[in-house]
Image (spheres, helix red, strand yellow):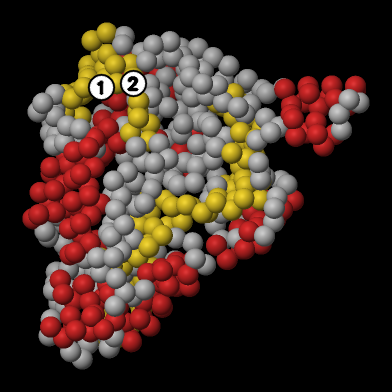
Amino acid sequence: MTRYPGKAARTIIAAAALTGLITVSSAAAEARNDLVIGMGIEPTGLDPTAAAPVAIGQVVWQNLFEGLVAITEAGEIVPQLATGWTISDDGLTYTFDLREGVTFQNGAAFNAETAKFSIDRIIADDSINPQKALYSAIESVEAPDDGTLVLHLSQPAYDLLYWLGFPAAVMVEPQSEPTNATDPVGTGPFAFSEWRKGNQVTLAAYPDYWGEKPALENITFRFIADPQAQAAALNAGGVDAIPEFGAPELVSQFETKKDFAVVPGTTGMEVVAGMNNAEPPFDDRRVRQALMMMIDRQAIVDAANSGFGTPIGSHFSPSDAGYEDLTGVLPYDPEAAKALLAEAGYPDGFSFTMKVPNRAYAERAAEIIQAYFAQGGVTATIETSEFPATWIQDVFKDTNYDMTIIGHAEPLDISIYARHPYYFNYDNADFDATMAAIARATSENERLDGYRQAQDILAEDVPALFLYAWPKIGIWKAGLEGMWTNEPVPSNDVTEARWSD
């Protein structure tokens, strides 16, 4: 099905050709109101409330579907279909004021009843929402009038506002719900136009959008799995932008070309070397601190990822609001590391096994870390583990491991260190209390202060060796503006994208 096709580009170019007043090249420059984006993975469907793959949100979140709130590129929570909200003193009642005059792309009105339908669908017993657990604190939903939505919680959960900005919590029009996976309908600035399976999805500007109209009329998401083919498509002009270029080692060819911009940023994925904190010697904080000081994080990024990635000192990404650079808490200092190991009772070092998933980034990092440990008298034997099946069973479920390396891709997932049980086997009452205080927060400043405290605790206690935040390597044609540099939420938000004059 095709809806709202953009025709302006064809019209302008045709007129220019007829009149002969401008050249073909300048006509193309003036007429450019479309964008072709390359993606490595094709989504399995187009409804982010019904399936988990990240690629779904990377096509439709913010572009086609919107939520009560949105998450900005800076990781901040801002109003969207809700213009504001109040939280009761006990943190158990959230009252949202809803935006007026909003329609879905099938013409149906957005109001409190449709918002209630969307939230009820997430928390229902038979819900298939991939992030249902994030919204488990919602006990009931009320729509007292068209412009008001009330959420009643079973326990304080201030992060609920953040989760309500996720792709999994976008607002859904009830009549379109059964077919959203193949023919999605949202309230966003772009409407679904066409899906050529195995090739591309096209969106077109929605003329009745409630907010500021986008500069572009047509967006095409083209699916190219192989990084070499992505690079070729960029060079040949088959795509205009690849917001997440998958091969750091191929980036250099674009850095010297004036026709391209290479824009490195960060994502919400933290790469860490997790340790089994319940087993010696990792049950001794001094040992964990010593291991942290034995490795040069920037050198790992340089060697394993061609320099792309941001060293981190805690389990928090630079793309998240409230981030602190804590790499200086336990910096690379081999001599101090050896002294701390001796103080912990290991003057001659010790031996252990790194159970590493067979993923390139993890295997590369493991080899580099192994070499650093050897310089400090610590022997690490690398054991490859098939991912996901074997690794998940041995490490994640059975905690049958000493150390591992893995990327935690869930946004804002620092709370995993307060889960009991969890594969780190980490237990810190102060950290647990801090996470509980964050849940009870009643303001954004209070919430972010809590996250700063949580980062500080982990940076000192090192339940895992914090390595780097996974990079977002954007490559696009020169003149393209408004693309995200960082990615707190996996997305290709092009609502502000435009071609410069």
Tag on residue 85?
1
Work out whether residue 456 or residue 219 is closer to the camera in this orientation and state it: 456
- Residue 49 in the image: state x and y as whole percent: 39, 33
Q: Amino acid at mark 2?
A: Ala
C-beta proximity under 8 Å, tags 1 and 2: yes
Q: Residue at x 37, y 35 (%)?
A: 71
- Determine whether, in the image, residue 55 is placed left or right of residue 480: left
Q: Is residue 127 visible?
A: no
At mark 1, the secondary structure is: strand
C-alpha span from label 1 to label 2: 7 Å
- Residue 228 in the image: state x and y as whole percent: 65, 60
- Determine whether, in the image, residue 470 is placed left or right of residue 219: left
Tag on residue 82?
2
Q: Residue at x 78, y 33 (%)?
A: 28
Location of residue 464 by image quarter:
bottom left
Q: Residue furthest top?
A: 145
Task: Please say if 33 is above or below 420.
Answer: above
Q: Amino acid at mark 1?
A: Trp
